[in-house]
Amino acid sequence: MFENLSAQPKDKILALMAAYREDERDSKVDLGVGVYKDASGNTPVMRAVKAAEKRLVKEQSTKAYTGLAGDPAFSDAMIGLVLDGAVERDRIAAVATPGGTGAIRQALELIKLAAPGATVWLSDPTWPNHPSIIKYLGMKSKTYRYFDTETRNVDYVGMLTDLGAVLPGDVVLLHGCCHNPTGANLTKPQWKGVIDLLKEKSAVPFVDIAYQGFGDGLAEDGAATRLVASSFDNVLIAASCSKNFGVYRERTGILMSVTKDTAQRDLAQQNMSFLNRQNFSFPPDHGARVVTTILNDPELRADWEAELEEVRLGMLELRKQLAAELRRLSNSDRFDFLAEHRGMFSQLGTTPELVEKLRADHGIYMVGDSRMNIAGLNEKTIPVLAKAIIDAGI
Ligand code: PMP
């Protein structure tokens, strides 16, 4: 049987991580994989997560199965965090999932059940897992322009032009904040423009929000998702806790479906629980319970928000320092976009050849599409990267 298998394409980021590990240069800089790192290159367990885990160890009295949708208290807490009352609670169906990826997978399977002919529209570029899962599920997809490689900002006109071809019932995937890989985000008026167009087209928005709290703050980063959720009868929202709670390996995420009324909500809830059942039965609980404990305890929540804010401001400071150093070295403002981008990533907007040159000549590792993880930098490596960028002629 197994002889019939064909080789799968290698995951580019994992291959990059392996090459980085093998590089013997002391000066090497890892800007590849999408994991937050502090100034010493560690991905710490957040203080509130440690405290909540201690509490769970002491107080948890059973590891029996949760419901198929996970712990209802997790759904309530996450709906509060992401939507903050923007939509009536009885219009929202929710299931816990293995990470944000699990939520995306379940959302796509739900679309397959509800609208098998729908096309899923993706930003060009987007997180590579989006097209890869869509292809694996045999669904139709199209792309809309998103990034202007000249300005390194959102190509808003191109985006609206391409979304002009959306058909009624098509699904449009939008990054709720901190766009991955580009770091370029819609302004509030632009979000309104996209919402108006999608309403006119009778499209269904699907928001992927994986970095709430990494951009402009917890509330600010949730604002676009709330605006979308309150503007349509039907919206899908996939939220990840991996980054903002630092619980990557615990696989903690949630799929929310905003529906028209409670009857639709019940139907969506049933189908989402059914899909969990088919794919893995009960979703992982440990990370979800940690997140719930933090969100529902004022003291833990305040500490989590404070640490998340330190993380966010630290990345913002790195952005500012890198932009300033490049401004100094290039004697121009052409890299100022780095300070304007938000989240963990920025796309430099250069060629795979020059990305390879940065790796070969300077030991700087970034994804081939020139996405860099800003959190991989520190005060020592910023001048190294800036000089390498200028030396490479980017
Ligand atoms: N969406 C986007 C855009 C992401 O960048 C990520 C994380 N790389 C996810 C979803 C999901 O991450 P996870 O499955 O680790 O929660």
Image: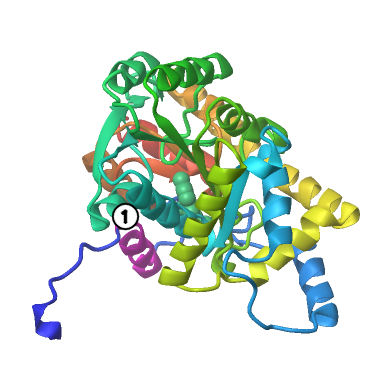
Image location of residue 100, percent across then percent down: 51, 55
Residue sitting at x 79%, y 67%: 52
* Magenta span includes 22: yes
Image location of residue 36, percent across then percent down: 57, 53
The segment highlighted magenta reads 12-24
Image location of residue 43, percent across then percent down: 61, 61
In the picture, which quadrant includes the N terminus?
Answer: bottom left
In the picture, which quadrant includes the C terminus?
Answer: top left
Task: Check the image and report above or below for 74 versus 223.
Answer: below
Q: Nearer the viewer, residue 291 or 385?
A: 291
The residue identified by callout 1 is: 133
Residue sitting at x 32%, y 45%: 358
Q: Main secondary structure of the magenta part?
A: helix
Residue 346 in view here: yes
Residue 213 in view here: no
Q: How many numbered marks are there? A: 1
Horizontal relation, residue 106 to residue 320: left or right: left
Q: On the image, which quarter does residue 22 sit in?
A: bottom left
Residue sitting at x 41%, y 16%: 200
Q: On the image, which quarter does residue 60 sit in?
A: bottom right
Query: Judging from the image, what secondary structure is the residue with disc 1 in?
Result: helix
Task: Check the image and report above or below for 122 versus 58.
Answer: above
* Magenta span includes 91: no
Residue at the limit of the structure toward the left, as seen here: 4
Q: Nearer the viewer, residue 296 or 210?
A: 296
Horizontal relation, residue 202 to residue 193: left or right: left
